[in-house]
Structures are given as C-alpha cells and as structure tokens.
Amino acid sequence: MDINEAVDALGGLAQQSRLRVFRLLIQAGINGMAAGDIARAIGIPKNTMSSHLAILARANLIQARKEGRSMIYAVNLEGTRSLLSFLVEDCCQGDPSICGPLIETTLATCCSE
C-alpha cells in the first residue's frame, strides 16, 4: 500500500457512521451482511448507507457480492491487512521479528478466509 491508498482508506474510516459500519462488518466476518440490515443496525437511511458503503468499497476496506436480490457487504480482509501493515511497517525500526506477528494475528482469529 502506498501513502495515497492509505490516506484514502483512513479517509473512508474518518466519519462516525462509516467507522461504525466497518466495525459492524468486522464483527460479521466473511459472511457479511445485507445492505438493508447494515442500515437498520446503524440506524441511518438506506440511501445514505449506500453512499457510505461506496466510500468504504472505494477505500478497499469492504467488498460487495450479489445474493439473489440483495447486496451483501463484507470486510475486505486483504485491504484491511494492507492498511494495518502500512500503519505499523516502520515500528520498532522496521524489525519484522517484533512487529510482524502483530499483523499476522490481528485478523487471523476472527476473520480467516
């Protein structure tokens, strides 16, 4: 991930409703949730939710798939891992033996693909 992609991803999360959506989808795991269910859980109108979901998808933090008549959104694990890696890649003076396990274990236990 380069700095521009990181800024886009962080910008996608830099709004209360979008951050709540992202955290909800992290909890939902790889099965994700229907857009309408997300809107109800967060308590915002569906058209507003659509805009938030589009921003998070462009930031490479979530992805969508069609199931019947519903759009199912789930966390994009690779995009999320890339952002987390970017944020800590220089920690401990870049010593991977200290910081490497942080990224490997961050999403592994709850969100294995």
Image: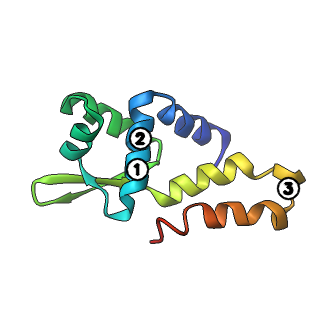
Amino acid at the residue labelled 3: Gly
| In the foreground, 105 or 70 | 105
- Reply above or below: 5 against 14: below
What is the CA distance from the residue labelled 1 to the residue labelled 2?
6 Å
Which residue is painted at 25% across and 32% down in the image?
43
Q: Which residue is mark 2?
A: 56
Q: Earlier in the sequence, mark 3 or mark 2?
A: 2
Left or right: 30 as drawn, with respect to 95:
left
Q: Are marks 1 and 2 in contact (CB under 8 Å)?
A: yes
Classify residue 55 as left or right of residue 96. left
Counting residues from the N terminus, which is met first, the one under dot 3 or under dot 1?
1
Which amino acid is tagged 1?
Answer: Ile
Residue shown at the point (26%, 35%) measured from the top left: 50
Reading the image, the residue beneath label 1 is 62
Left or right: 2 in relation to 21? right
Element marked by disc 3 = helix
Label 2 neighbourhood size at 10 Å, few (<14), some (14-19), many (20+)? many
Position of residue 28 measured from the top left corner of the image (x, y, whole percent): 35, 57
Residue marked by disc 3: 94
Model colouring:
rainbow
